[in-house]
Amino acid sequence: MKPTTSVVPVPEMDQLIRVVRHRPVILDRDLARLYGLETRALNQAVKRNPDRFPEEFIYELARNEILSISQSVTSLASLRFSKQVRAFTEHGALMAATVLNSPQAVKMSLFIIRAFIKMREDQVANAAVLKRLAEIDATLLQHDTALRDIYQKLRPLLEPAPEPPRRQIGFHAKPEA
């Protein structure tokens, strides 16, 4: 199979970054495609340089993680049959570019790093929005409680006034005490 040399457009790159084990990663097959290589060639370069790829840079996915990713994205159905799938963190993807040292790898590594940075910025923005929504929700709960108290206090005023006692006609004896 001949390696592909097409450059992946930047908007598609953020779709290639997935969250696995609570960390943003890019799969070896996607990284190889971005760098214009076969997946096998990328993995061989990683194996030749084990000191450059500690556990926090790259890790192999467990079978259930592969199944989860391949089921959530239909275009990755072929992952189910892969024996080994590696996930590269941001630093692992950058290290792969330095190991490969091809012009396309260096060029694409910049795009990959920018995509990871954008993803981090989006997460921070989302966290700020969620925090603000939680504050608004708490304020609304306080207002609901205050309005309920006011309603309970005003309710007697809203009810119609009781009719005054009618004056009784005739002679009525007061009970003796």
Image (cartoon, rainbow, N blue to C red):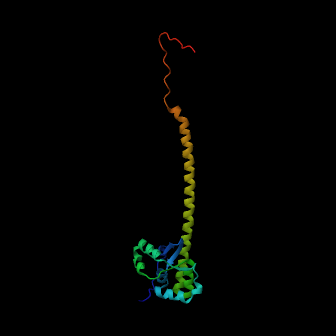
Up the image or down, 118 lies above or below 29; here it is: above
For the point 55% across and 67% down, the residue is 123
* x and y percentages locating residue 173 in the rendered image: 52, 11
Residue 164 or residue 68, whichever sits in front: 68
Q: Residue at the spot x=57%, y=66% of the render? A: 124
Which residue is painted at 41% across and 78% down in the image? 80
Q: Name, please, the residue furthest toward the right.
A: 51
146 displayed left or right of 83: right
User: How many numbered badges does the structure rendering display?
Assistant: 0
| Residue 119 in picture, x, y percent from top left | 54, 71
Question: Which residue appears farthest toward the top when viewing the image?
Answer: 171
Q: Quadrant of the C terminus?
A: top right
Q: Is residue 18 visible?
A: yes
For the residue pair 161 and 172, the one nearer the viewer reads as: 172
Residue sitting at the far front? 177
* 65 vs 97: above or below: above
125 or 73: nearer the viewer: 73
Q: Quadrant of the N terminus?
A: bottom left
Q: Is residue 69 above or below residue 137?
A: below
Residue 136, percent from left and from top: 56, 53
Q: Is residue 102 visible?
A: no
